[in-house]
Structure formats: C-alpha cells, structure tokens
C-alpha cells in the first residue's frame, strides 16, 4: 500500500501551539531518499537561506587575516575554531564600506559602521527624529521572497534596540542598535529574548500572552509539545521509518531547547538596568548561552522554513561588554583601542576568538541538519563580519568579512580571496541576492557583482 504524501506546509497543531515541520521524505511526491543523487521536484528543492551577522569593534586584523591567498592557507588564530568547516566558508579581504566614513560629519564611526553595514548608505547625522539611512539587504530580500514563508524575516541580538537618544557623537541610538532597515527612515527592532523568539516560532497565539501569564505557564512546566502530542501521534502513524526517526529527533531537539530556556540563569531587572542600553529581565545572564539559544532559534526557523532571512547582532555598535568568562574584565570597546599595547591586543584577540567559537557552534548546528540536497549549512549564505576593520584605527576598508555556506552548490568554499582596494562590500550583496534567486544589478553603492 502506498504511503500518503503530506504537504511541505504541514503543521502540528494544538491549543495555542503550531509547530512547523522539517523536510521529510513523505513530503516528496517522488519519494526520493535523502543524501542520494537525484533531481528533486522543483517545489521540493532546498531553498537558499540568508543570515547576516554583525560583531562590534572590528577584529584584531593580524590574527584574522590569512597570510596566503587561494586554498593553500593556514587559518589564523581567530578563525582556528572553524577548522572543521573550512571547506564551507571563504575569507574575503579588501572589501570597503564607504558609507561608514565621516564624509564631513566628524566622529561617530561605530554608529555609521552598523548603520551602513547592510545598507551601504551614509546615515544622516542626527540624534533626533529625522533619521535617514538606506534599505538593508535583508529587508530588500524579505520584500521579494518573504511572502513564501510565515515570517518574512527574523531579527535577533543580545542587546536591545533603541528608537531614539544620542548614542555616538551626535548619532541616534537607532543607528547604533539596529542594522536592519525596512525603509530609509524605519529601522527594524530586534528581539533579544530567546523565549519570545521561541513563542513566535511555535506557540501561535501565545505570543499575545502577558509576561506574567507566560511565567505562570513556565512554572507549570508545560511544554509546547504537550499541546500537539495528539497531532504528532497521528502524523507518526503515516510516516516511514526514516521520517519517524527524523520527526522524533526534531521534536526532541525542541524539547531540549525548551529545557535550556527554562534553566537559563536570567538577569534581574536591577541588573539589566546597569547595561548601556536597557535589557529586560528574562534574557540569559551568560552571554555565550544567550547567543547559542538565539542561534538555535535561527536554525529551527531555517529548518522549518518559517523564514529564509535572519539577522543577528552579537552586540550593538561600540559595545563595551566585558568577557570575564574568558578572563577579560575590561570592556570590549576599551580593549579594542589597544594603542599597540601587547596586553590589550592579546585581550581583543581573545574576545574575537571567543566569538568565532560561538560561530562554530552555529555551523555545527546547521551542518547537522540534513536536507534533500546537502545540509542546511550547504544551502545557506551566512555573512559574518563588521563595518569596522581594525578597532584601534576605526578604518572602514579591508574589512573582516567571512562568507559561509554554498548557496545550494553555487559557491566553492575553502578559500581566502583578496579583492582590489576599495572594492565595495555591497558588491558582495549583489552576488548574494542573485544566488538567493533575487535578481539585481545594483545595491547601495555597488559597482559590480562580486566574483567568487
């Protein structure tokens, strides 16, 4: 008897819960086996996902930049944590972000660096309501393909967005704390609470719960899986052995994340208020666990095709967070201005290496998720970098840029590519949009499509 085919958009439902599913063999009319050579039906081709990540204060460039070009290069200290995935990313040197330069506006490099990072625009210097920037690449992509998924895009980070205020030498906090811009005057605020992101992905109408109601539910230790158990049991009966195993692994992963969310040591309100920008109680106290949970949310969002476009800010521009967990008590921004001090250079490099360790965690998560064509990492485009090169100099050329993923086989990895001086970073964005099936000839201040 032929097993029934189920829709790619099948959702497990219960009262106040809706769980999208990963790709299953039962969703393919052709019933092809995962991992085997085949030509998948057009509607079941793995989509290209796009993730844009920002780290503040640049990098310690001597420990970031490979000494050789091409394939035969040794990973420098900051990128050593990514050795396992070196064939799935490229290091791109020589790219510049002209919009982050002063152009007569004086100081404010940190604000300009993040405002221009995904837009290629030069933000208007103001700390009033007349902010003006450019549309960011993620929001342009969301306007073109966001209708194909439940969420057009997902914006997350570890430090809250702010709509106003003076945060950097006369630049609005809206520039400092946001890198996604839906229009030239409308930044897209990011979500910093992993539990709230989880609710957006899985709990349907529960997103409307008040914090007190959500806390009561957590105290009762009710899992979102409890509400869809009947639907999951019914679906399991119609699946083959491989799909049953895949479904069980997926649901187990959701439960494991729920447990980590519940156990995470949270900031109290009085502690949260001590941060540069207000952070509500509820976010994990530990930076590493906070970032890993957000990365887990991104992986789940991509795996279930809830969205194909995400952005993640490791921290806001100019962040002065300390990293005592790795032995750096001073603030990140402070040590980035090392003044050639060997001690401070060692500390800034240590922070940069810690960030790449967390990046490796994300790569591990994405590469472990099998799809009909390769892994989720293979089918992604992941930008990791900063709008500042060396944090001590505040330069905006020769930026630290890493591009991971193969865009479904369109890109070769494992290379260090150096481009001519002043090549616009936005040239890369033109290429990324085209690889994602969004044809463009120009974006921001681009001059051509970057060739990889």
Image (cartoon, rainbow, N blue to C red):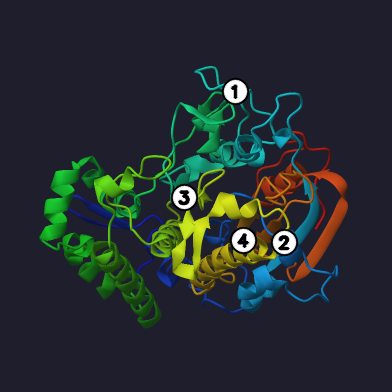
Quarter occupied by residue 103: top right
Q: Is residue 95 visible?
A: yes
Q: Earlier in the sequence, mark 4 or mark 2?
A: 4
Which quarter of the rendered picture does the C terminus lie within? bottom right
Residue 83: quadrant of the picture: bottom right
Q: Are marks 2 and 1 in contact (CB under 8 Å)?
A: no
In three-dimensional space, the C-alpha distance between marks 2 and 3, rounded to whole angstroms, equals 21 Å
- First-in-chain label (2 vs 3): 3
Mark 2 and mark 1: Cα distance apart in space? 35 Å
Q: Residue 147 placed where, x, y %? A: 48, 40
Q: CA distance from mark 3 to mark 1?
A: 27 Å
Residue linked to disc 1: 132
Q: CA distance from mark 3 to mark 4?
A: 34 Å
**Viewed as shown, does residue 61 lie left or right of 131?**
right
In this rendering, the label closer to the viewer, 2 or 1: 1
For disc 3, the marked residue is 307
Q: Nearer the viewer, mark 4 or mark 2?
A: 4
Against 213, residue 380 (above or below) is: below
Determine whether the residue tagged by mark 3 lies in a helix, strand or loop.
Answer: loop
Between residues 242 and 331, which one lies in front from this camera angle? 331
Q: Nearer the viewer, mark 3 or mark 1?
A: 1
Which residue is denoted by mark 2 in the rendering?
410
Alpha-carbon span between mark 4 and mark 2: 35 Å
User: Mark on residue 259?
Assistant: none
Quarter of the N terminus within the rendering: bottom left
Q: Are marks 4 and 1 in contact (CB under 8 Å)?
A: no
Residue 348 numbered tag = 4
Residue drawn at x 38%, y 75% as measured from the top left? 246
Measured Cα–Cα span from mark 4 to mark 1: 32 Å
Q: Give the SS element for disc 1.
A: loop
Rendered position, 50 above or below 176: below
Which x, y percent locates residue 401? 70, 55
């Amino acid at each position: 008897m032929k097993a029934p085919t189920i829709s790619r958009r099948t959702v497990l439902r219960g009262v106040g819960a809706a769980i999208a599913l990963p790709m299953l063999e039962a969703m393919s009319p052709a019933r092809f086996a995962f991992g085997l050579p085949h030509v998948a039906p057009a509607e079941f081709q793995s989509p290209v996902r796009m993730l844009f990540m920002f780290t503040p204060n640049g990098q310690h460039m001597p420990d970031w930049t490979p000494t050789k070009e091409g394939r035969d290069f040794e990973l420098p200290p900051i990128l050593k944590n990514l050795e396992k995935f070196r064939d799935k990313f490229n290091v791109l040197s020589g790219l510049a972000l002209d919009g982050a330069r002063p152009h007569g506006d004086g100081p404010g490099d940190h604000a300009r660096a993040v405002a221009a990072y995904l837009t290629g625009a030069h933000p208007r210097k103001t700390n009033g309501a007349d902010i003006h920037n450019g549309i960011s690449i993620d929001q342009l992509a969301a306007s073109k393909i966001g209708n194909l998924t439940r969420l057009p895009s997902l914006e997350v980070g570890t430090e809250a967005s702010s709509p106003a205020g003076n945060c950097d030498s006369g630049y609005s906090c809206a520039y400092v704390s946001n890198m996604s811009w839906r229009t030239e005057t409308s930044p897209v605020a990011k979500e910093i609470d992993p539990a709230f992101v989880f609710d957006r992905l899985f709990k349907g109408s529960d997103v409307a719960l008040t914090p007190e109601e959500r806390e009561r539910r957590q105290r009762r230790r009710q899992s979102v899986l409890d509400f869809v158990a009947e639907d999951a049991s019914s679906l399991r009966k119609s699946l083959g052995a491989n799909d049953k195993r895949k479904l069980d692994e997926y649901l187990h992963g959701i439960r494991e994340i729920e447990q980590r969310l519940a156990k995470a040591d949270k900031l109290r309100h009085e502690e949260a208020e001590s941060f540069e920008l207000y952070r509500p109680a509820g976010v994990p106290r530990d930076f590493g666990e906070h970032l890993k949970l957000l990365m887990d949310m991104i992986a789940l969002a991509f795996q279930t095709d809830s969205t194909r476009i995400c952005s993640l800010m490791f921290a806001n521009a100019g962040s002065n967070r300390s990293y005592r967990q790795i032995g750096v008590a001073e603030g990140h921004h402070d040590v980035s201005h090392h003044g050639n001090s060997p001690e401070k250079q060692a500390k800034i490099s240590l922070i940069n290496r810690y960030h790449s360790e967390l990046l490796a965690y994300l790569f591990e998560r994405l590469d472990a998720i099998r799809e009909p064509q390769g892994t989720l990492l293979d089918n992604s485009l992941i930008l990791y970098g900063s709008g500042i090169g060396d944090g001590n100099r505040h330069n905006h050329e020769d930026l630290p840029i890493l591009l991971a993923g193969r865009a479904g086989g369109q890109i070769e990895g494992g290379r260090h590519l150096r481009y001519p001086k002043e090549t616009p970073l936005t040239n890369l964005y033109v290429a990324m949009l085209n690889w994602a099936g969004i044809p463009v000839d120009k974006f921001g201040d681009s001059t051509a499509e970057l060739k990889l």
